[in-house]
Structures are given as structure tokens and as C-alpha cells.
Amino acid sequence: MENLQAYGNLVSRSYYDDTLNINEILNKIHCSDALSFLKRMPDNSMDLIITSPPYYQQRDYGCGGIGNEATEDEYINNLLPIFNECSRVVKTTGAIVFNLGDKYLNGNLSLIPYKFALKVLENKKVFLINQITWAKTNPTPRQEHRKLIQSTEPFFIFAKTKDYCFKLDEYLSHLDRKDKKVTSNFSKIGRKYFDTINQSNLTAEEKKNATRELEKVIEEVRLGKIESFRMKIRGIHKEAYGGMEGGRNNQIRRNGFTIIKITGNAMKKDLIESPVEITKGNKHTAVYPLYIIQELVKLLSNSDDVVLDPFCGSGTTCVAAKNLGRKYLGIEINPEYVSLSEERIKEADNYEEFFL
Ligand SMILES: C[S@@+](CC[C@H](N)C(=O)[O-])C[C@H]1O[C@@H](n2cnc3c(N)ncnc32)[C@H](O)[C@@H]1O
């Protein structure tokens, strides 16, 4: 039975006879063209999709596939149906991450990743949560004296609904641990503020509240919930100027004091540094860093979730998923890369990669 319920410009697959059974295709790499395989996958069945399609006119991976179209428009028009299928098969809590590289065409940087992202957004079926910039610490050197070395690539994170899974504490958490200073002498932390409160011209009620809040925040430091704090007291500390500080100034005026907690967590920015990687024997020439993919898997999924890569290549996404206790599903058109992925996945064993 065919269900012709519209899904944007797609058709729901829920009731097609040839729809694949998810349980039969999980934890495998499938040798197929991405579009025809995706078309047979059920709606809302994947928790997360992370992929890097072939870049425009960069390489020939053999077996036809995408990437060597005559024009940019043709390339984008071939990618869009695949993206649309991704947005159909991802759950409403899921995200779709596309990594694309740019290219100089006739001496002009083409901005093709952004042209693609803009086209995707025209459809209004997904929204763009972030564009994470991968800063390559070892970009390919070039004999070029009139241009800077290209050393960044975007990872676009799209979501289908506002319910997308987003676990900020899990993302780059090793950097939090690295940045956290060990505070050895708790007995001294913040004690000076007790005297400052007493010497201030706050009312008796305000002094009582300030002392109570100070005791609470000292306890938070002792328990390791925060790294440290600062206190500002009316009449003693200067008010800050404008911006985000406006709320704090109001607190000082209203309550007589404000407490600024310092969590010690690294600021989670839309920039991630990592070297370019190669697989053993350089069997695949365009792998993306396992480290970045692991961080994205941690940010955008829960353990046991299913992570799909429709352009699986050497299997980096699937390795990251396996390492982090997720299920995986890979699609790759070139049988040699299917075998390479399978080899890498077999060797993967709960190994987390960090870059500090
Ligand atoms: C940029 S590489 C992906 C590399 C991968 N992220 C990794 O870390 O190994 C793109 C891959 O897409 C594959 N490919 C190209 N066209 C395809 C298609 N229509 N369906 C499925 N795979 C395709 C290529 O063979 C290539 O391995």
C-alpha cells in the first residue's frame, strides 16, 4: 500500500512494501547509492545523521557517485534530494550534520558549502542551529603567495524541530577538566566578603541576606559545583557598564549585592580545532577527524541512539558511534571503502580520542 501523504516535497515511506526493516540494517555498512538506500528507509527512524558528501570537483572516489558534476548548481541539485531524505528519516529529536569543503573556481572562492546551506533553508523543513568551524591545525601547504592558506571547513548542524537533543555538558567536557584549577585551600575562599558585608552600609536585612547567600556559594565551591565566585556589594564595588551587566547592576541596587559564579567550564564555542587525519596506508583520501565526530555524537545523541552516515567513506562516523555506545548505519557506494569501514569498525573498541 502506498501512502502519498506529503512530507514537504517528499512522500512519506511509512507504508511502502519495500521499506527496510531498521532492525535488519543496523550496525552495518551498506554498499549502495545513498539516495536509493535512504528512499527505502522508514520516516523518523534515525536519531542523528553526520556526514561529509564528496566536495565539489575535488576527487573521484570511483563508482560514479556525487561530486564531479559540470556545474555547482548540478552538484547542489544532486545533494538536495539526499538532504531531504535525511530530514525525512531523522527523528523530530534528531539533528543532521553536513560537513562540506570550499573550492577556488577560476581564482574565486566559490562559497559552495554556504550556497548549499542556503538552498536547504529555503525549503523551511529544517533550521540551522549552528555552523561549527573546523580549524585545521595542519592544513595542506600550498605554493600560493597571493592567498592565505585555507584552513577551515564548516559543519552545519540542522534540526527538524526545536526538540533536538543537545547535551552541552557532554561536548568538549575534557577541556572543562583540563581548565579546572584545583582549589586546595577552601577555608580561605570568599572569607574576605564577610568582613566587607559587615563594613558596608547595607541595611541589617540586606547584610543578613548577603551573608546567607555568601555561605551558600562558599559551600558550592567546597562541593566542587563551581570553581570560584566574586561578590559585588553596593557602595563598595563599582557598577559595571551596560550590556549583560545591566541585570547585575539591578540586583546590586535592589538587594545590595550580587554574586558572580565562575563555573570553570570551557566556553562552548562554535569553533573546534583538530588536525587533518589520514587512515592507515592512506586508503581513503578524505577522512574527517574522529575527534570532531565523537564530540558531535556526544553533543547531539544519547547512548544507544542510532547514528547514520549516508556517505560513509572510511567509516569515521560509525567508529565514533560505536566508541560511544551508539548504534550505527553506514551507506557507501564504493565497495572498497565499505570493506575499509568494516575493518576500522572491527578495530574500534570504546576508544575515545581527545585533542587538547
Ligand atoms: C568525503 S568522503 C566521506 C569520508 C568520511 N567522512 C570519512 O571520514 O571517511 C565521501 C564518500 O562518499 C562516497 N559517495 C560518493 N557518492 C556517493 C553516493 N551517491 N552514495 C553513497 N556514497 C557516495 C564516496 O565514495 C566517498 O567515500
Image (cartoon, helix red, strand yellow):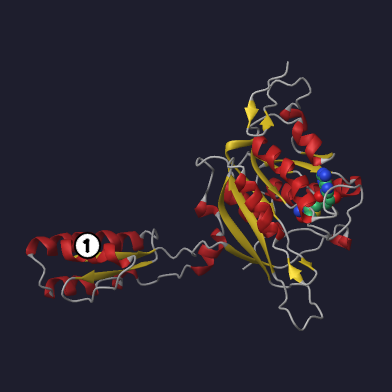
Where is the N terminus found, in terms of image quarters?
top right
Q: Report the residue at 37% width, 59% height from top.
A: 223
Q: In this view, does 323 lie to the left or right of 279?
A: left
Q: In which quarter of the image is residue 199?
A: bottom left
Can residue 99 be seen here? The reply is: yes
Q: Report the residue at 52% width, 64% height from top.
A: 177
Q: Where is residue 112 in the image (x, y as percent from the top left)?
A: 71, 59
Between 47 and 354, the one lying in front of the other is 47
Q: Position of residue 194 (x, y in %)?
A: 19, 70
Per the image, the residue denoted by label 1 is 251
Amino acid at circle 1: Gln
Q: Quadrant of residue 256?
A: bottom left
Q: Report the residue at 26% width, 69% height from top.
A: 231
- Residue furthest to the left: 204
Q: Position of residue 155 (x, y in %)?
A: 65, 57
Up the image or down, 20 lies above or below 335; here it is above
Where is the C terminus found, in terms of image quarters?
bottom right
- Residue furthest to the bottom: 145
Q: Report the residue at 81% width, 47% height from top.
A: 346
Up the image or down, 196 lies above or below 345; here it is below
Between 180 and 77, the one lying in front of the other is 77
Q: Quadrant of residue 38?
A: top right
Up the image or down, 57 lies above or below 159; here it is below
Label 1 sits on a secondary structure element that is: helix
Between 339 and 228, the one lying in front of the other is 339
Tally of marks: 1
Q: Is residue 98 left or right of residue 202?
A: right
Can residue 313 be seen here? The reply is: no
